[in-house]
Structures are given as structure tokens and as C-alpha cells.
Amino acid sequence: MKAFTAVVERCPDTGLYVGFVPGFPGAHTQGETLDELNKNLKEVIEMLLEDGMPKLEAEFVGTQTVMVG
């Protein structure tokens, strides 16, 4: 079993959760709830892995808080 880290954002226009795996082309989707988003991401990643493990273009490292002003 392989674990992937997804970045999750909420679209202010639609209210949908949007998720993507950094550096993994095509690994992105959306959902009305976080559970739906997770299910959709799993389906997309499984589909993409049918062609074999991709060469990831980037590796998720983390987040940083930047103080301004």
C-alpha cells in the first residue's frame, strides 16, 4: 500500500473541496465533503496507477506560515 499526500483547498465560488497530489500529473479532483474528496482522490490515483507508478515531478514537503506586516 502506498500513501500520497494531497493538498486540500475549498473553492470560494462553489464551496467544493478541491484536492491534488503535488507533482503527480492528473491526480486532482473535487468533492462536496472531505470524505467524498478522499474517495474521489483514491479513485483517481488508483486509475492513474494502472499505467504504473509515475515519476513524480515534485515531492510534498510541508507548509509554512509567513507573517507579513
Image (cartoon, rainbow, N blue to C red):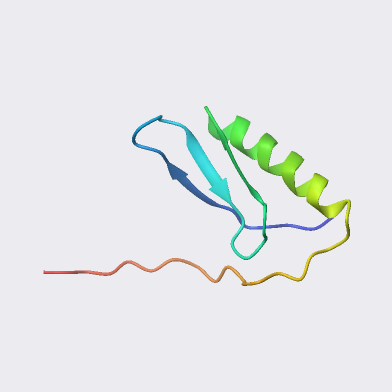
Instruction: Find residue 37 and report its horizontal and vertical position in percent.
Output: 60, 36
Identify the residue shown where x is 58% and y is 68%: 60
Q: Is residue 23 above or below residue 11?
A: below
Instruction: Find residue 36 and report its horizontal and vertical position in percent.
Output: 62, 30
Residue sitting nearer the eye, 50 or 1: 50
Q: Residue furthest left?
A: 69
Q: Is residue 25 above or below residue 33?
A: below
Q: Quadrant of residue 43?
A: top right
Report how many numbered discs are placed on residues in the image. Answer: 0
Identify the residue shown where x is 55% and y is 46%: 19
Judge left or right: residue 41 versus residue 13. right
Q: Quadrant of residue 42?
A: top right
Identify the residue shown where x is 67% and y is 43%: 41
Instruction: Find residue 52 and report its horizontal and vertical position in percent.
Output: 88, 60
Q: Is residue 50 above or below residue 41?
A: below
Instruction: Find residue 20 and report its horizontal and vertical position in percent.
Output: 58, 51
From the image, which quarter does the N terminus lie in? bottom right
Identify the residue shown where x is 50% and y is 68%: 62
From the image, which quarter does the C terminus lie in? bottom left
Residue sitting nearer the eye, 49 or 35: 49
